[in-house]
Amino acid sequence: MKFRALLLLCFALCASSASGRASDEMFDFETLRYRAKMLAARPYTPRATTVPAALRKLSYDEYRLITFSGDQAWWRRDGLPYQLQFFHPGFVHQKSVQVFELNGPTVKPIKFSRDMFNYGGLKIGGGLPDTVGFAGFKVLGRLNLPADELVSFVGASYFRALCLKTVYGLSARGLAINTAEPEGEEFPVFEEFWIERPVAGAKQCVIYALMDSASVAGAYRFTVTPGADTVMQVKAVVYCRKNPKVLGLAPLTSMFWHGENSGTNHGDFRPEVHDSDGLMVFNRANEWLWRPLSNPKATRVSAFSDDNPRGFGLIQRDRNYESYQDLEAHYHLRPSAWVEPVGNWGRGSVRLAELSAADETNDNIVAFWVPERLPEAGQAIEFEYKLHWYSDQIRPPAGFVASTRTGHSQTHEPELRRFVVDFDGPYLRQQKPDPAIVPEVSVGDGAKLAYMTVQKNPYNGMWRLGFGIKPDASGRPVELRCFLKKPPHVLTETWTYLWSP
């Protein structure tokens, strides 16, 4: 996700009170897990800020003058395969986090220093103690270049990563609590971080984080392996002070303003503007689902029930520059993110929340896994997953949805809502027009199927499935599904759509 000013205004980091830790303290994941358990056993107390008022009062333009000095990157002088750079506290970063280096099991605080930053002529009165902390940090390593940015953590429990030939787009979080619920969302915070000092030639970077919030405390470990498919192995143990109404595991957050299925571009010159264009799900029944994203007029939530899911993610499937026409934002280069559960996650559902967005500065899409049941408050919730950041490496083995369009005819049966779904894939491209390839379309309550057709597109080799529905007078949202088959074989993933009259 882009760390937009509006997002940061809402989800500033909380401070840490642990800056005075002894450098000889021993540390491992079990130590962190125990800290989280003890933290959850006590009533929640928000940590006081260590950020001076002068920094908290900085304007947007003033804060932008502050930049990190590249020659001050942590581990740069040591010639190690990874480096750390830090975000300065202030402006919307009203609280800070503490960051520690792990050298074996030994903890060493990484102290704030003004020498790490360029202030661009900005005058900040008074001294800044070395315990003030940072707004967050980023890890640099070899990707396209020897010292490319790989991953960053800044703002609540948000983080994002890059793979080869991509630019920052969507982001992930540690947890989602009561997302899209009427009582309002709770945003847990990574309060402290520990980062393993890499050895020469290390292929991975390992990061630990302590989470805290009104409802939960948790211990996290992120093992980052950069590449064409950058993989973050995430191990987490969470303890609830009180069980929330909705606890979302492995949440992903993205932006969808408008696309080919929107029916409007809001007066924007670009055909499409989004970080992700669909939710992809691979369920235990070996069915691949594709749900195109939307920018609804009001918040809506969809759930896809499953038992021990195989994977889900928010995907930027359209990689064609012409679809976006943006030379600055490079939406065609935004990565996709795919959650691959490790171990048995049990019964639950993949939940998709789509919020209304007035422009592209609002991240209005969230996807996460909701367990069917939670243990009693205070009991450990343990889960692990691989989080893939990639361009095109993960997709259904059969045909996939290439585009979704919807509208109606001005002259012929204007009462019908029409849908055009294009399917692509190596097998489909090789097939000549064949009457044995047929569509399967299902329409939920609120409308009736009026017609359906399928044809080979001679111009691009795809297959186009078209159908129309006739809504009833109820005004209910209508669930739609379709795919292509050549009996007895299913040739494509399942397109699923929620259409609102």
Image: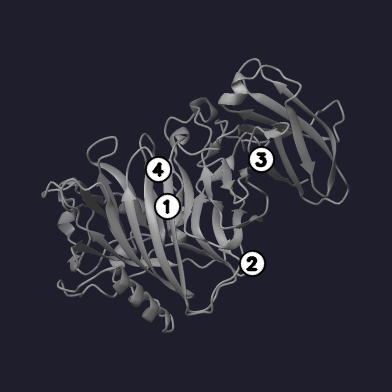
Compared to residue 431, the image places residue 346 above or below, namely below
Q: Secondary structure at mark 3?
A: strand
Q: Residue 129 at x, y = what percent?
A: 19, 69
Sequence-earlier tag: 4 or 3: 4
Q: Amino acid at mark 3?
A: Thr
Q: Amino acid at mark 2?
A: Pro
Q: In this rendering, would 135 be left or right of 189?
A: left
Question: Mark on residue 100?
Answer: none
Sequence-earlier tag: 3 or 1: 1
Q: Secondary structure at mark 2?
A: loop
List the residue tagged with mark 4. Answer: 168
List the residue tagged with mark 3. Answer: 494
List the residue tagged with mark 2. Answer: 182
- Which quarter of the rendering shows the C terminus? top right
Sequence-earlier tag: 1 or 2: 2
Real-space Cα separation, disc 4 to disc 1, in angstroms: 19 Å
Q: How is the image coloured?
A: one colour
List the residue tagged with mark 1. Answer: 386
Say few, some or many: other residues with alpha carbon within 10 Å of mark 4 (under 14 / 14 to 19 / 20 or more). Answer: many
Q: Secondary structure at mark 4?
A: loop
- Tell whether label 4 touches label 2 (CB within 8 Å): no
